[in-house]
Every structure is written in structure tokens, then in C-alpha cells.
């Protein structure tokens, strides 16, 4: 049987942070079970989940369509921004989207929102992107709902001119207010202006039965109670992951709009290279290669170390051979594996720190087994004296990026990061994002609050969750391990409802933070590789990909760990 004539082009996963509860693997599995050949991820103003989604989709034979549901500034009324979906057609489109999202986060916030302006779109360029009009949340939809056809047509002309041949008018049916009026008006405008129409479905959760859990998630993020009659209710229980058949039935009157969802999927052909490393360019003297410069610096550095270790010249001559042999072996391996730049970059900022009054640790972890690191001043332990093995740190048979754990004095660490920013350019350097999740104990408290259950009641129940190795057990394991929990779930309806909702939200992404020590240095503009995020409009900048994902796309992480003992 052939695949249904529909592809989902709108999906808010858990990485939309405030209002999606779809786990990426579940979304891909659902697309596979519905025989959909492709699936889009369009989280709200971010690409946090992009690398994970790309890998899951490719590994399961699904074509990943990558984009974002972005907020567009409304110059006339800043309190009412518009929405637009941007999908990447190519690598160029991916870079444009990274640049646009980064600019939005680095610009001053509008009522706490990161917004893309029309000026940004023109400056960055959009020829690698496809735009969907945003249906009722877009500026065209707003004009149509107000009965202003002339304004709607003029706005549509603007977008069609900007996204030449890649702008689609969106129609949706998920039980929203004035649904049919908007569908018929949008279809009429599309016919009148000869613009393509596309049917989309804004997926916020996987199953119809997840609606209440999704509402709880929104309330947790926005500080409302579930039962509050005054809280905004923009979502409906129809926003689950519908099958192609369900969508075909829903839009039986607009078959071309269904076909265009497949056409858009055909037009998006973004391929991302994973697993190849891109080191920043380390400046070497004119005409000297990185490899030669590493050999040169390591030899000079080793000479200095040997003079410290063996001040007596005849003793030095007797001890030299094993050091020279080890240095030769290590430099050959480092060069063969393509990492001379990495060692030179790390040595440069560590030696700057030492010269400029920032205490640095002596080195720990497997990196302390390298004579080259010792010679360059990265570590301060003589590996031969302590019989430390270089192969534990770098091994040609197990190719992975070298990784030095470097401790800096807590109070001066920022100065070293600032030096790196100056040297490689602010646009090439950022820290790394981390995602906080809803652990079993925390999710019980969060869900209890939005259900308006007494604090002590929820606190008491969450404390019944056993802790192992400093981590609370998952809800399922806790119920199996703690008889009191099982008994209360069986006997008390409130506890049963609390656990049912909490289980659906457990371990979802709850908030965005910053990695304690990781710093990225890119070869050129960081946004050519991944977008950046800032919680406060440019104060602290982090990558939108976490530490595993930045390494997958080839950016190199340097650890700048703050250690109070060195202060």
C-alpha cells in the first residue's frame, strides 16, 4: 500500500520547552508506523533538538525536514507578534536559519521574546528557506480574520516577493476558533493570487489522551493552575500526531493542499555532515605548517623541562633518550590523527593564564599521560616518572577528539575565556547549552502545584521516592520499590491522577542552562555550524546544541573548569 498523501510539517517536541511534550524518538517511531516517508521538526524559535532528530530520523529511514516555528516582530503592535514556519531547503538555508535565530536571541528582547524582524530576513537572505504563512497566527491570517482582504493580499505579496517561489499559505483544522472561516478565506486568497496552499497540523503531543498532560506542561511553564477558568487555552485535544488517512479525511475538500505537504518535503534536501571535526585556525609563523610548528614548540618545551628535571648536564644526557623517543612517537601520532592545532590552542590559552596571574591546575585525567602536553606547559606532571600511558589519552585505533580537563582558578576563569574570545573573535566563541529535565521528584511537585494540591501533600509523596546514588528513582521503579506509594495510588484518586500526569511528563526538558566548563571555538562564524541562544539578549551566549551534539556536528569543546581550591 502506498504512503498516505500527507507529511507533517509542524511538530513541537519537548525542546519547545514551554509547550510541546513529544519525545523525538516517539515522533520518529510514529512516522514509521504511519508509513510517512518524511517528518519535520519545527520547535518554537530554536533548533535545540535538531541533531538528535536528524540522527533518529536517518537511522529509521525517515527523511528529516528541519526548521523552526519563528516569531516575527509586529512593528505596528509589539504586543502581538506573528508566527511563520521556516524550513531548510539546503545547507545554505540551514546557515540562514542559524543566523536568523542567533540574531533574534542576541538582540534586546521584546516582552521577553526573541523576535526576527523583516530587516534581519533581508540582511541574512532567505533563498535557502521555505516559508509557511503561520495560518491564524500569521499576519495574513490575522488580516483575513478581521475581514481585511486588501491588507491580507498586500501582506501575502510581501512574503511572496521575499521568499520567491517558496512561500505557501497554510490552512489548519484542529478545532480552533473561526476555523472554517479562515480556511475558506485563505483558500480564496490563494486562488485569487495564484499562491500555493498547504495543509498542516500543529502537533503538540503524541496521543489524543496526552492533552491534559500537555495542558499541565503549559501551566507549569506559565504559572497557571489547570483548573483556572481565566487561563489562556490556545490548544485543543485535536493537536495529536494524526495519521495520513486522518489528514486526508480532514482536508478531502482541498486535495492540492495535502499534495503540497509532500511537495514541500521533496523540496527540502538538507544534509548535515556528522562526525567530522573542524578545529579553529591556530596562527603559525609565515610558511610554517601546524605540524612543523607543533614539533618545534614541543622540542623547545621539552628542553626547558629537562633542564628543570636534571640541572646537572651529564645526568641530563644520560636520561634524555626515553624522553626524546616518547616525544617523537607522540608528535607523530598527534599529527597523523590531525590534532596538532588542538594541542597548540590549549597550550596557548593555558600559558597565557599562567603568565597573567590565573592559577591553573597541574592537569588531571588521561591527558596527564602526554609528554607533548608536559613539554607545551599544558600539564605539570612528568609522565615518565609516574609511568603514565599516552595511549590512554590518544589512540589511533579509537579515533576521538582529545579532551583535556583543565582547572582554572574560579575567580579568574572568565579572564581566560575573554582572552580566547579576543583571539579567535567573539562570533567564533560560545559556551554550551545544557537542558534541565523533570526528574521524578520534581515532576510530582510541579504537577501537584498545577493541580492545586496542597504543598505538604505533594512534598510528602515526592519524599517517598527512594534515592539511589544521589538520584531519585524513576516513577515506575519507585512504585515497584516502595509499597507505600503503590498503596496510596490504589487507594487515593488524587494520588492516582498526580502519578498519571507526572508519568507522561517525567524526564521531559524543563529549562535551558549553561554547561559548567565547556567552551566552543569555531573556525570562523559559530552560526555556520549551529545557532546560539542567550537567555538575556546577549549577556551569556551558549550554543543551541548540547555537548554531545556540538561534537557530532564537528565543533571542538575545550574544558575551562573553575576550581575553588585554586583561588
Image (spheres, rainbow, N blue to C red):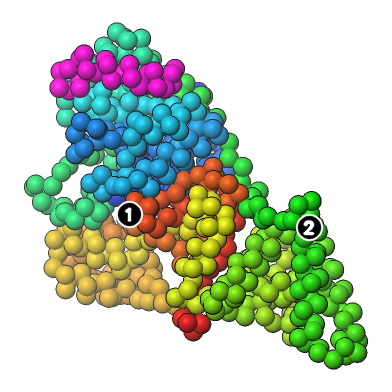
Give how far across and how far down residue 21 sits, in percent. Answer: 33, 48
Q: Vertically, is 356 above or below 282?
A: below
Q: CA distance from mark 2 to mark 1?
A: 41 Å
Q: Which of disc 1 and disc 2 is earlier in sequence?
A: 2
Quarter residue 4 falls in: top left
Give how far across and how far down residue 194 sits, in percent. Answer: 36, 9
- Answer left or right for 491 relative to 272: left
Q: Is residue 495 in sight in this rendering?
A: yes
Q: Which residue is mark 1?
A: 536
Quarter residue 163 falls in: top left
Q: Is residue 10 in sight in this rendering?
A: no
Q: Vertically, is 394 above or below 271?
A: below
Q: Nearer the viewer, residue 8 or 305?
A: 305
Q: Are marks 2 and 1 in contact (CB under 8 Å)?
A: no
Q: Which residue is mark 2?
A: 291
> What crowding class fits label 2: few (fewer than 14 Cα within 10 Å), some (14-19), or many (20 or more)?
some
Residues rendered magenta in the picture: 143-167
Going 16% across and 58% down the picture, which residue do you hit?
A: 451
Q: Nearer the viewer, residue 390 or 215?
A: 390
> What crowding class fits label 1: few (fewer than 14 Cα within 10 Å), some (14-19), or many (20 or more)?
some
| Prevailing SS of the magenta stretch | helix
Q: Under tag 2, what secondary structure?
A: helix
Quarter residue 9 falls in: top left
Going 46% across and 76% down the picture, which residue do you hit?
A: 410
Going 25% across and 54% down the picture, which residue do you hit?
A: 221
- Answer left or right for 165 relative to 493: right
Going 40% across and 58% down the picture, which residue do you hit?
A: 540
Q: Under tag 1, what secondary structure?
A: loop
Amino acid at each position: 500500500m502506498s504512503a498516505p498523501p500527507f507529511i507533517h510539517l509542524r511538530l513541537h517536541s519537548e525542546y519547545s520547552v514551554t509547550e510541546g511534550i513529544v519525545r523525538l524518538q516517539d515522533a520518529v517511531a510514529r512516522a514509521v508506523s504511519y508509513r510517512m516517508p518524511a517528518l519535520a521538526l519545527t520547535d518554537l524559535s530554536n533548533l535545540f533538538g535538531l541533531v538528535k532528530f536528524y540522527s533518529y530520523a536517518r537511522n529509521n529511514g525517515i527523511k528529516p525536514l528541519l526548521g523552526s516555528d519563528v516569531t516575527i516582530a509586529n512593528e505596528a503592535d509589539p504586543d502581538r507578534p506573528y508566527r511563520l514556519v521556516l524550513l531548510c531547503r539546503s545547507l545554505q538555508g540551514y546557515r540562514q536559519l542559524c543566523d536568523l535565530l542567533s540574531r533574534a536571541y542576541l538582540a534586546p528582547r521584546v516582552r521577553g521574546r526573541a523576535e526576527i524582524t523583516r530587516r534581519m530576513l533581508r540582511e541574512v537572505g532567505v533563498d535557502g528557506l521555505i516559508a509557511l504563512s503561520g495560518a491564524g497566527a500569521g499576519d495574513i491570517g490575522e488580516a483575513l480574520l478581521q475581514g481585511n482582504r486588501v491588507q491580507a493580499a498586500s501582506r501575502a505579496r510581501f512574503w511572496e516577493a521575499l521568499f520567491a517561489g517558496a512561500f505557501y499559505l497554510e490552512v489548519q483544522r484542529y478545532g480552533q476558533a473561526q476555523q472554517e472561516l479562515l480556511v475558506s478565506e485563505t483558500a480564496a486568497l490563494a486562488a485569487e493570487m495564484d499562491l500555493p496552499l498547504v495543509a498542516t497540523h500543529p502537533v503538540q503531543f503524541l496521543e489524543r489522551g496526552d492533552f491534559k498532560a500537555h495542558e499541565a506542561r503549559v501551566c507549569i511553564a506559565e504559572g497557571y493552575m489547570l483548573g483556572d477558568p481565566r487561563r489562556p487555552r490556545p490548544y485543543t485535544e485535536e493537536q495529536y500526531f494524526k495519521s495520513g488517512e486522518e489528514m486526508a479525511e480532514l482536508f478531502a475538500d482541498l486535495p492540492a493542499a495535502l499534495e503540497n505537504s509532500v511537495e514541500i518535503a521533496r523540496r527540502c534536501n538538507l544534509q548535515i555532515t556528522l562526525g567530522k571535526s573542524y578545529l579553529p585556525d591556530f596562527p603559525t609563523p609565515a610558511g610554517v605548517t601546524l605540524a612543523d610548528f607543533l614539533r618545534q614548540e614541543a622540542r623547545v618545551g621539552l628542553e626547558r623541562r629537562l633542564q628543570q628535571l636534571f640541572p646537572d648536564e651529564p645526568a641530563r644526557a644520560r636520561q634524555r633518550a626515553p624522553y626524546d623517543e616518547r616525544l617523537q612517537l607522540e608528535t607523530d601520532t598527534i599529527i597523523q590523527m590531525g590534532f596538532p592545532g588542538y594541542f597548540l590552542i590549549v597550550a596557548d590559552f593555558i600559558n597565557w593564564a599562567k603568565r597573567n596571574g590565573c592559577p591553573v591546575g597541574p592537569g588531571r585525567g588521561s591527558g596527564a599521560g602526554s609528554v607533548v602536553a608536559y613539554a607545551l606547559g599544558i600539564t605539570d606532571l612528568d609522565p615518565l616518572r609516574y609511568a603514565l600511558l599516552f595511549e590512554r589519552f590518544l589512540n589511533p585505533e579509537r579515533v576521538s577528539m582529545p579532551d583535556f580537563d583543565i582547572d582554572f582558578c574560579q575567580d579568574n576563569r572568565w579572564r581566560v575565556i575573554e582572552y580566547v574570545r579576543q583571539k579567535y573573535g567573539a562570533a567564533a566563541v560560545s559556551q554550551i547549552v545544557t537542558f534541565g529535565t523533570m526528574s521524578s521528584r520534581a515532576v510530582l511537585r510541579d504537577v501537584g502545584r498545577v493541580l492545586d494540591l496542597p504543598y505538604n501533600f505533594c512534598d510528602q509523596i515526592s519524599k517517598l521516592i527512594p534515592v539511589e546514588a544521589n538520584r531519585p528513582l524513576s516513577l515506575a521503579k519507585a512504585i515497584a520499590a516502595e509499597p507505600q506509594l503503590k498503596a496510596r495510588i490504589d487507594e487515593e484518586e488524587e494520588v492516582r491522577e498526580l502519578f498519571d500526569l507526572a508519568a507522561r511528563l517525567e524526564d521531559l526538558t524543563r529549562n535551558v542552562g549553561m554547561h559548567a566548563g565547556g567552551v566552543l571555538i569555531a573556525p570562523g562564524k559559530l552560526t555556520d555550524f549551529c545557532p546560539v541562544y542567550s537567555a538575556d539578549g546577549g549577556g551569556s551566549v551558549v550554543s543551541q546544541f548540547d555537548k554531545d551534539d556540538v561534537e557530532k556536528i564537528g565543533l571542538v569543546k575545550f574544558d575551562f573548569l573553575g576550581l575553588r581550591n585554586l583561588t
